[in-house]
Amino acid sequence: MNYIHNTITKLKESSPAQVEFYQAVEEVLDSLQPILDSNEQYQVHSIIERMIEPERQIMFRVTWVDDQGKVRVNKGYRVEFNSALGPYKGGLRFHPSVNASIIKFLGFEQVFKNALTGLPIGGGKGGANFDPKGKSDGEIMRFCQSFINELYRHIGPTRDVPAGDIGVGAREIGYMFGQYKRLTGNFDGVFTGKSLLWGGSLARKEATGYGCVYFAQYMLEDRSDTLAGKRCLVSGAGNVAIYTIEKLYQLGAIPVSCSDSSGAIYHDSGINLDTLKELKEVRKVRLKEYLDVHSDAKFIPIEDYPADGNAVWRLPTAQLAFPCATQNELSKADAEVLVANGCIGVSEGANMPSTQEAVDVFLDAKILYGPGKAANAGGVATSQLEMAQNASMQRWSFEEVDEKLKVIMRNIYCSASETAAEFGQPNNLVLGANIAGFRKVADAMIEQGVV
Ligand code: NDP
């Protein structure tokens, strides 16, 4: 424990004020003690010290002109964390909260997540503190072009392959790819999450949400249970939340909530997916407008959320929870309410949505808990399937991709649960996922020498 404690202390000294990054590192390192104890070569090779230091961090100015002719300035980031298993792979996030700490936490998680998929991809993450909300299409395009004017020199199909994340969907990927192509002259698979018209993969859009529900299904199956008839709380109303809700319906469950940064919707008879898609994918408006179509639903504005948590997790009894919005959106108090209300499982669509204290509540209560780096890995896995289709100039059907996604999610679940059992903590998928991912990356790093 001293070794891990000292490592975290040094990290805090060398990378001040990066609280989300410390949180992600501490969560992983806390799980690794058993494997560090059983294999001293990881310490001899300073694997932990190397893993928590990104291979490369690129920070740059993004200058663009708004519709009023004013010059605006944002901060752009790409953290190329670890390439032991393959080219850097991970999304770009455009959100005003983005800073070096958030991008580093996401990049660090991505390394383990990508390793868990069993696919040849390293880990990275990037983005900008740019707020796409309220921006015109022209402003979004000019921002994306300026962002790529710097980033293009660092990315490439065998080097670093970005994708979407919060605030970055098919439209933004399109503008960034267009500028990349203009600057380099290359039409290659340098982004994933592309439009189906020019190299995107069927089922990529759905993959993170679908995968997160498959993960829940596999956890339940191990307890001889199913999703059928289960009432589910979902947070978020973006890409991951929408396709989590879609797959829950397909497998017979009843999702009763969703949320955005203005508040939460509770619909006792089940969220209407068509309305949600119309509001968020087509009209891109606030969730409150859901009430215009469904007067029997309830809207809880963000101002009315409890001081110690998120109103979504305080809604009437549900058996399953799917946090699909953002980091630290589920507090210890939320976790206690969920468990007290009879929740039997949590599958994380978002990255690190539960605080460390909330995770401890789930593990102590021995409910099913699928950590984000395992449960939401379906998105990046399908991104790699998109890269494979681009490289071989093939196009697979929706069913083919979905079938591969199911197999990958099952393998991730088995890998995490078998590793947890191997280290004497069956059902602790946090420990299982962290050790299984770590082992692959660490062994590859040792084989590749001191680089
Ligand atoms: P989107 O931008 O499509 O949607 C994000 C949703 O979460 C929106 O409804 C947004 O509301 C809400 N949200 C974001 N930040 C906050 C906040 N601070 N407080 C309350 N609500 C918030 O992003 P995605 O669905 O793609 O991503 C959601 C999560 O899933 C993120 O953690 C992401 O890292 C993770 N993830 C995504 C993958 C993907 O393939 N897209 C893959 C793996 C993980 P509003 O619009 O009002 O801001």
Image: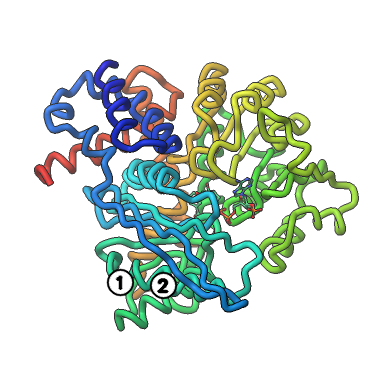
Q: Closest to the observer: 13 or 249?
A: 13
Q: Classify 193 as above or below 310.
A: below
Q: Is residue 117 visible?
A: no
The mark tally for this picture is 2
Which residue is farthest left? 449
Say which residue label 2 marks: 395
Identify the residue at horizontal 67%, vertical 26% (top origin): 338
Question: Image quadrant for the N terminus?
Answer: top left
Q: Closest to the observer: 62 or 344?
A: 62
Say which residue label 1 marks: 392
Which residue is farthest front? 70
Where residue 366 sits: x, y (%)? Answer: 54, 19
| Mark pair 1, 2: CA separation | 9 Å
Q: Is residue 435 left or right of residue 298?
A: left
Quadrant hosting residue 256: top right
Where residue 90 sits: x, y (%)? Answer: 39, 54
Identify the residue at horizontal 22%, vertical 18% (top origin): 37
Identify the residue at horizontal 17%, vertical 27% (top origin): 43
Where residue 223 sits: x, y (%)? Answer: 54, 26
The local crowd at label 1, few if under 14, some if 14 to 19, many if 20 or more residues have their Cα within 10 Å, is: few
* Dot 2 beta carbon under 8 Å from ligand 1: no
Residue type at tag 2: Arg
* Dot 1 beta carbon under 8 Å from ligand 1: no
Q: Classify 331 as above or below 51.
A: above
Residue type at tag 1: Ser
Q: Is residue 118 left or right of residue 280?
A: left
Q: Is residue 450 left or right of residue 333?
A: left
Quadrant hosting residue 417: top left
Q: Classify 161 as above or below 313.
A: below
Where residue 112 sits: x, y (%)? Answer: 34, 41
Judging from the image, what secondary structure is the residue with disc 2 in? loop
